[in-house]
Amino acid sequence: MNAIDKLIEKIKETNNPTVIGLDPRYEMLPKCVTNKYSQDLEGVSKAIIEYNKALIDSTCDIIPAIKPQIAFYEMFGIPGLEAFKETCRYAKEKGMIVIADIKRGDIGSTAAGYSNAFLGRTPIGEVEKAIYDVDFITVNPYMGTDCIKPFIEDCKKYDKGIFILVKTSNPSSGELQDLKLENEKEVYAQVAELVEKWGEELRGKNEYSSVAAVVGATYSKQLEQIRKIAPHTYFLIPGYGAQGGKANDIALGFDNNGLGGIVNASRSLMCAYKSDKWKDMFEEEDYAKATRAEALRMKDELNEAING
């Protein structure tokens, strides 16, 4: 089974098109966790691992996937990367799909090196070793086909997937992505066409490809347009919740069968225990229960908008 079919099966199993973004800023971790550990890189790493594992335990039966953003681990050096690796390993152990948000993009042997680390195998003498061994990664296509090809080759060889940046959710994305080309197409529309083409050989039984796209929830018109341009391309949809993306807007990226996208929420899930909705109901020590409550609320809201 290829990567996108595995993801779709988990979405169907949980009846939930949600991915929890595990982006652990140290200052947002509850004191009941951080007070257990030393105030150094090793202590921070241990706190992050405990926090992430608690959130995974509380949601693995209702959320199909996690999306750890590697920047929030790299900033803590080697111990932080150990926390990243352990988070990915633990989520897979619990049956969740892992989408590593790494946004790599380079050419030739450099792209192959990135792909070896996360999707494929790293050769060491006569042995090939899986390093992070995640299910999907995010990829920046700015350098064109040359920077995408090594990732696609590993997707074919190891049943992995990639989400390629097409239209991102940040406020200034339009400075480049909305520019008109000589053919009158926007840059994001041209990239969407390329993603659809790049993914032709990796379509699964649901007619979606493991070469997928990142399309932000904060730009609903573009989301709807890109769905028409790339009907076989699955969407990773950031921007829901804290960034302002609404469920009804997100529904424009889905097909008539309720498939086509998985919606990321990071702060709204990770920090649910601090939110106005849940802070009076849950104590700090119950942060994982608050995350579960918010995940169930989000699930119901999305399903109503997509299938209603």
Image (cartoon, rainbow, N blue to C red):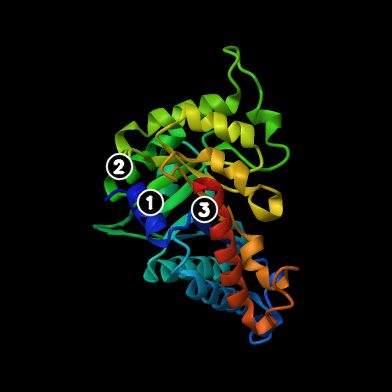
How far across and down, in percent of the image, does residue 236 sit? Answer: 51, 46
Please state which amino acid type lies under the numbered disc 2: Gly
Distance Cα–Cα, label 2 vs label 1: 10 Å
Q: Is residue 93 toward the left or the right of residue 229 in the image?
A: left
Q: Is residue 271 above or below residue 163?
A: below
Would you identify the image quadrant in which residue 295 lies? Answer: bottom right
Any part of residue 38 in sight: no
Evaluate if marks 2 and 1 touch, with contact meaning CB atoms under 8 Å apart.
yes
Residue occupying the point 53% across, 42% down: 214
Residues 56 and 240: in front is 240
Residue at image position (52%, 53%) is: 303
| Residue assigned mark 3 | 303
Q: Earlier in the sequence, mark 2 or mark 1?
A: 1
Q: Which residue position is annotated with label 1?
A: 8
In depth, the one of 238 and 134 nearer the eye is 238
> Given this view, does label 3 or label 2 mark the residue nearer the observer?
3
Total numbered labels placed on residues in the image: 3
Question: x%, y% of residue 138?
Answer: 50, 47
Which residue does the image show at 59% across and 63% down from the upper left? 297
Disc 1 to disc 3, how far (Cα)?
15 Å
Residue 163, numbered circle = none
Q: Which mark is residue 204?
A: 2
Q: Position of residue 174 (x, y in %)?
A: 69, 32
Quarter where residue 48 is shown: bottom right
Q: Do we see residue 66 in this rendering?
A: yes
Q: Earlier in the sequence, mark 1 or mark 3?
A: 1
Disc 2 is placed on an element classified as loop
Q: Check whether the beta carbons of the residues at disc 1 and disc 3 lie within 8 A of each other.
A: no
Of the pair 201 and 127, the residue shown nearer to us: 201
Please name the amino acid that badge 3 sits on: Asn
